[in-house]
Image (cartoon, rainbow, N blue to C red):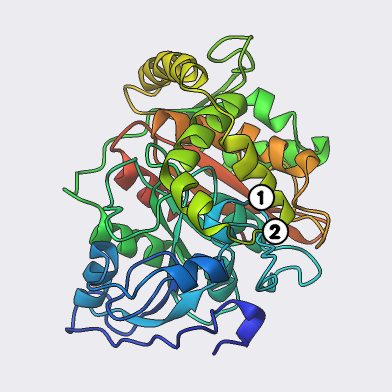
Amino acid sequence: MATALNAFCAHADVTIDGRHRGVASGLAFALKDVFDVEGVTACAGNPDWLRTHRAATQTAPAVAKLLDAGASLRGLTLTDELTLGLSGENFHYGTPTNPAAPDRVPGGSSCGSAAAVAGGLVDFALGTDTGGSVRVPASYCGIFGFRPTHGRVSNTGVVPLAPSFDTVGWFARDAKVLKLVGEILLENLRETTLIRKVLIVENLFRDMDGVAGHAIRARVKKMLDHISIECVDLSNFPDDSVAPADLYRTISGYEEWVVHGQWITQNNPTFGPQVAERFGNAAKVTLAQRDEAERIRRSLTRTVHDLLKDGTILCAPTTPDVAPLKDHADIPEVRLPLLRVTALAVLAGLPAVSVPLSKRNGLPLGVSFIAGSDRDENLLELAAKVSLD
């Protein structure tokens, strides 16, 4: 299994059959290699992490829930180093194959999970989404990807990156499977409420190729013609002095160093050049910078929560373009535009689903829907109503 699409990790051959007959019996899943599995050491995409950590003594609650529901674990999947990436190109272990575009990256950091699902190796897979690490590979690989409301799924037993942003997310080729996984994982399931309005975020579509952006917006309007659809410009949101992507990078950088700085200092691990540079930048973020960014983040969160009350959801591109070619993905010209479209849901702690709704030159492009806090169930139901023909 380790060689299939280079999606699976070679350091541990982990297969666990579902523990009971349940709602997920007969489904196979893969697991991003940052989750605890009893008796297994997580690699987190870095050999020095693997070398300096012990095997888990118990299985992460999210994984245990899936096994208890009858799903069978069929392997651990490759990730960007310590999940700090959006391309899926790992300096040590290579790049999983994107089944939708083999000459292009799968997206990261949940790259192996996305590739395994897109390639039909498993029915669904768990990943993590801190800054877009489920939604970006879902878009690039042409599958569904879900980021829940921050805190709705337990992060216990998962290697952290930036705790105020970290979420456990998941992939599926089928919207019904996506919804089923949500019903297993989400804490305190809620009744769905009526979606009354969809706001298309025009300024984020302007980052896309004009033809592709127009085609996606037209398709959304056609498929959701029973819902009121309006356009909104959030280009000065929360204000015109600080972009959401920069807020994210400041806060996440500070947290990344708090979480991993001591381990890095003590063990001097070998990182790929881009990851080393990012941790170097993270070490320089001051508490004062973090505090100012948090102040603006709180203002943004209040505003966007108010915007999404009364059954309103946002629609935006998941990624501004199709998957980049290999060796041309982990660069600022690609990474920063990605963060511009993924950061809003992250900063406000909101649920978001990427739906494979369009193609450009035969390559997949996802569109994202973002709902108010704890309205994850609405998005899972919506995803089942929209899909790529």
10 Å crowding of disc 1: few (<14), some (14-19), many (20+): some
Q: Mark 2 points at which residue?
A: 272
Compared across the picture, whether 112 is left or right of 330 comes to left
Position of the C terminus by quadrant: bottom right
> Tags 2 and 1 in contact by the CB under 8 Å rule?
yes
Question: How far across and down, in percent of the image, does residue 377 sit?
Answer: 30, 47
Foreground: 148 or 176?
A: 148
Tag 2 secondary structure:
loop
Question: How far across and down, in percent of the image, does residue 35 sit?
Answer: 37, 66
Is residue 90 visible in this depiction of the protein?
A: yes
Q: Hey, what amino acid is under mark 1?
A: Ala
Which residue is outermost to the top?
240
Q: Hey, what amino acid is under mark 2?
A: Gly
Foreground: 22 or 262?
A: 262
Residue at the (60%, 29%) spot, across then down: 245
Residue 276: mark in rendering: 1
